[in-house]
Image (spheres, rainbow, N blue to C red):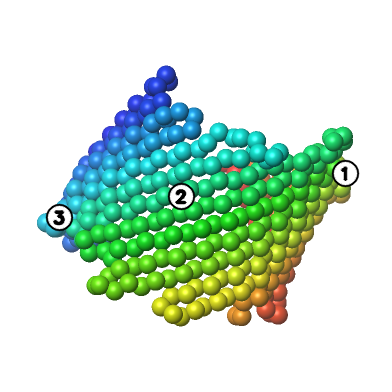
Amino acid sequence: MTQLTSNAFWRPDDYPLSITAGVRIFSSAGSSGSVSGSDISNLALNSGVFYQVNQNLRLDASFSSLYQEVSGIQDDVHRQAGGLLYQTDLAELYGFMYQAYLDGNFVHKVDVDDDVYDWSFTLGHGLTRSWWPAERTSMTSLRLNVNQALGYVGAAGEKLASRALVRVDHSASLSFNQQAWGGNSLAQLTLSDSRSSSSQEEAGTTADRSFEQQLVNLQLSRDQDLGRRSSITGDITVQYVRVRDDQAAVVTENDTTTSTGRVMFQHYQMLGVPRLQFSSNYIVSNTSTEGAIDRADWENRLSYMIGKMDTSVSYRLTDTNSRNYDLLYFRLMRRF
C-alpha cells in the first residue's frame, strides 16, 4: 500500500480571503489474502475559498475530484459547491434587537450514476430581548427569542427525479435565569411550528407531500450548594410533539409526550476523609407512545482516590416497565 498526502493553506492577516488545497494519492495492490482482494488506486484533489466581503456578507466555494479505479473499473466523483451568508446589523426595534439573514448554497455533483444539481435558500429574521431587575440585587434575567424562517430546497438530475420543497419555521423561547441563595435556577419554555410542502416529478407524474410538526418543551433545573463539600442538582423536562404527514392522500398523525427527571446529590469529603466522594443519582423517564419503555434508575456510588490509584463501588437499581434489575459494580484502576 502506498499513500501520499499534501495540504496547503493561505490565510493572510491583512486580507479577508483564505484558500485551502489538498491532494492525496493512494494505491493498494489486492491479494488473495486481503480483505477486498481488489487493486485500488485513486487520486483525490480538493480546494476551497472563503471570502469575507464585509462584516455582513461572506462567500465560499469548494471543489473536489476523486479519480478512482477499482480492479480496472473507473469510478470518478466530481463535486463543486458555492454558498453565501448575509446578515444585517443588529438594530433596535421597540426595545428588541432585530436581525435578518439570507443563507444560500449550490452543489453540483457528477459520478458514474448521475449528474445532480442541489440548491437551497433560507430567508429568516429574529427578535431578542432581555430584562433585568432595576436594582440588580441578584443575577436574575428574563430572555425572549422569536424567530421566523422561509426555506426552499430543490434538486434535479439526469436520472434523479426533480424535487422541490418549501418550508416555513416559527419558533419562540422564553427563559428565566437566577443566581441566588447559593445556587442557580433555570426555567425555559420553547415553542416551535414547522410546516413544509414538497413535490417530486418522475416519469411524467407528480407526487405531493405536506408535513407539519409542532413542539412544546418545558425545562426546569436547579443547582444548589448545601455547604462547602456537598451539593444537589435537579432538573425536569416535559416535551410534547405533534406530527402530521400527508402523502399520496394518506394522512398519518402522531402525538407524543415525554417527561424526564433527575435528582443528584454529591458529597466531596465523606466522613471528613479527603478524596472520599459519594454520589446518589436518580433518573426517571416516561413516554406516552404505545410500546415505549418507561425507565427509572437509582445509582449510589462511593469512590476514593489515592495517588494514582482509583477505587469505586456502586449499586444501581433499575425499573424498566415494572421489571427490576440490580447491579453491584466494583472498579480498581491504576494510572500510569
Return the mark for residue 74.
3
Q: Residue at x 52, y 36 (%)?
A: 88
Image x and y of residue 76, in percent: 19, 52
Q: Residue at x 61, y 68 (%)?
A: 241
Q: Is the C-beta separation of discs 2 and 3 under 8 Å?
A: no
- Mark 2 secondary-structure assignment: strand
In the image, which is nearer the foreground, mark 2 or mark 3?
Answer: 2
Query: Toward the viewer: 53 or 265?
Result: 53
Return the mark for residue 122.
2
Please state which amino acid type lies under the numbered disc 3. Answer: Gln
- Mark 3 secondary-structure assignment: strand
Image height check: is 280 above or below 84? below
199 with respect to 227 (left or right): left
* Between discs 2 and 3, the one toward the N terminus: 3
* Between discs 1 and 2, the one toward the N terminus: 2
217 with respect to 61 (left or right): right
Q: Quadrant of residue 279?
A: bottom right
